Amino acid sequence: MSVLIKNGTIVTAENEFTADIYIQGESIHAIGENLEKEADEIVDAKGKYVLPGGVDQHVHFSFTYKGSKVRGFETSNAAAVGGTTTLIEFVNQVQGKGLVESIDEYRKTDADGIAMVDYSFHSVMTDPRPEVIEEIPKLAEAGYPTMKLFMAYKGMFFHADDDAILNALFKGKEAGITVMVHAENAEMIDVLTKKLISEGKTAPYYHAVSRPPVVEAEATRRAIYLAELADAPLYVVHVSAKEALEEIKQAYGRGQSVYGETCSHYLILDTDDLARPGFEGAKYVCSPALRTEEHRDALWEAVDKKWLNAISSDHCGFDYEHQKHMGFGEGNSFADIPNGAPSLQNRLNILWTYGVCEGKITKSRLVDLFATMPAKINGLSKKGQIAIGFDADIVIFDPDYTGTISAANNLEGVDYCPFEGFEQKGRAETVFLRGGKIVDGGKYIGQKGQGKFIAGEPYGYVYNK
């Protein structure tokens, strides 16, 4: 199969220019003006932008919280219509099993033959026995060169103490593993949560009060010190507070390889959403918590100035009626609400509408944050760029489209959308996955199981300082 995309404005992380793209099989074979190529399909992209398919390095399709489980890869077509062609899922180590074994088993039953876009995996270490620490380098051999540890969630099986993080940093750097942390101080959260509940402050809004910015800043600083001791690089996921951002900036300024991402919902939602009437605020319970406008402004500046180098969705698809309501009623509180925001489909929509269109980031910066840098961070050497030899993951973006974001036109499989009613400018009109068209006219036309596993390579971007 061959495709010739003509007359589009190609946007890369460095620049934009008008040119044609010739796809043969699964990869990009030629880029240039007025290409004369025989093709099975010719697509006229005049007046539209041509972007690399997005790489979302932070999604949850297997996450469980107090007995509730999120939607899985059967909803990954939502990524496709949002212009994302590669997902990276976090897989918790199963108690008593190894890191690689846990991912391999999950992959066979829950991803292979189901995913509708390409996919890779992060390991989440939950059982840091000595033999598990020794296994960490094998993640690189298996194509899973990244791992995450949760500093939050005291008492949960996936909580990691400092010794687990430090041992992971020491062992991970031997094989080029990128160690990521969810940076929140679990002890602070535990004390504040108990105090608020004892005072009868149980509504969803108090989720943010139980996790103030200092909780994130302290854990970020502590993780940075652990990385300094191990002389290892560190990646901080879902940065939401300007104080945590400052810790990352200062560490990098001192010469440490410390990097971080933020997420689309932290850029346009805030604590006012948690305070919505009735129990509506439960829809906005995620961790770290939503912040105020000053933190939103700081995050936009950070992604523009490259203090943070990726924007993910942190997609976590819990239902509102049957799962978020676990926190409602006598004896329940914000602490019982499953954490997470379903946001897989709207990452590009938000970045374009509220970033590019409002002058907060350039189109090239969007491409870097949305696709190019996430691929580099995770060792996906054929993803995230429009360049010869790369996978033909391509988005033809119509900037003239206007609409409204709503659960009614969402494929995430949950009963609400946290961005309900937000204006949308532009959309992914046509999407190619390795040369095959999977979105046409903004509608998913691909097939279940069309996505394939993409092995990551070790020594990702964090090792390149």
Image (cartoon, helix red, strand yellow):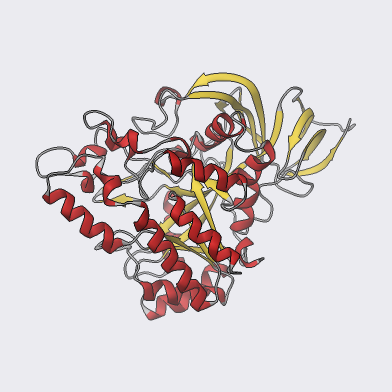
Q: Nearer the viewer, residue 249 or 128?
A: 249
Q: Quadrant of the C terminus?
A: bottom right
On screen, 74 above or below 94? above
The answer to whether residue 86 is seen in the rendering is no
Q: Quadrant of the N terminus?
A: top right
31 to the left or right of 331: right
The spot of residue 134 in percent (x, y) is 46, 79
Q: Nearer the viewer, residue 127 or 72?
A: 127
Q: Residue at x 42, y 59 (%)?
A: 105
Res. 367 image quadrant: top right
291 to the left or right of 20: left
Q: Residue at x 52, y 73 (%)?
A: 172
On screen, 389 above or below 269? below
The spot of residue 419 in percent (x, y) is 42, 30
Q: Nearer the viewer, residue 200 or 39?
A: 200
The spot of residue 288 in percent (x, y) is 37, 50
196 to the left or right of 114: left
The spot of residue 189 in percent (x, y) is 27, 57
Number of marks in picture: 0
